[in-house]
Image (cartoon, rainbow, N blue to C red):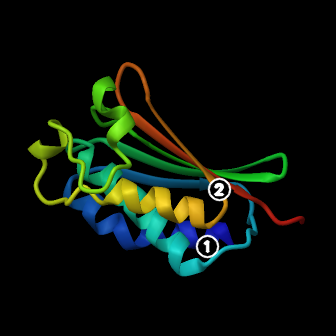
Amino acid sequence: DLTSLLRESVATLAPLALQKHQELALEADESLQIQGQPTLLGLLFNNLIDNAIRYTPEGGKILVSLAREGSQAVVYVRDSGPGVPAEEMEHITEPFFRGEQAKKYPGGSGLGMSIVKHCVEACGGELHYYNQYPKGFTVSITLKACDK
């Protein structure tokens, strides 16, 4: 149950968002079932949400949403952070890559998005990410939904 996995990840990471006075919300209209390894999917979503909290300034917003799009389940993690500089975008899923902007934030090893990429591939999904304008970053994960 993808909805339950997302609720668990949001609940686990909510204290970090509260420390930064951030708004962390989950929007999921229905329970969506997928085939996959819960441990791998939990690792994937915990990394994505942790990144959003880490790189979003104090007082910012992070929205995790789940939607069915045809036969697919799509998870979006959107934040109101600074986004990723265009010249770094193609490198963010490389192991140990930390861009200049990321180096301003404490902690982090540059493995988060690499882990996300490998988890998505292991689950047979697709990973997309892009900057929002005027600010923010969105990551989308597409996974095959099970029939209702």
Q: Secondary structure at mark 1?
A: helix
Q: Secondary structure at mark 2?
A: loop
Residue at x 12% of width, y 45% of height? 103
**Residue 37: mark in rendering:** none
Looking at the image, the residue that sits furthest to the right is: 148
Quote the CA–CA distance across marks 2 and 1.
18 Å
Is the residue marked by circle 2 packed among few (<14), some (14-19), or many (20+) residues within 10 Å? Answer: some
What residue sits right under mark 1 in the picture? Answer: 4
Quarter of the view holding residue 85: top left
What residue sits right under mark 2 in the picture? Answer: 125
Closer to the camera, 88 or 48?
88
Residue 139 located left or right of residue 94:
right
Quarter of the view holding residue 125: bottom right
28 to 146, vertically: above or below: above
Q: How many marks?
A: 2
Q: Are marks 2 and 1 in contact (CB under 8 Å)?
A: no
Residue 24 seen in the current view = yes
Residue at x 75% of width, y 69% of height? 33
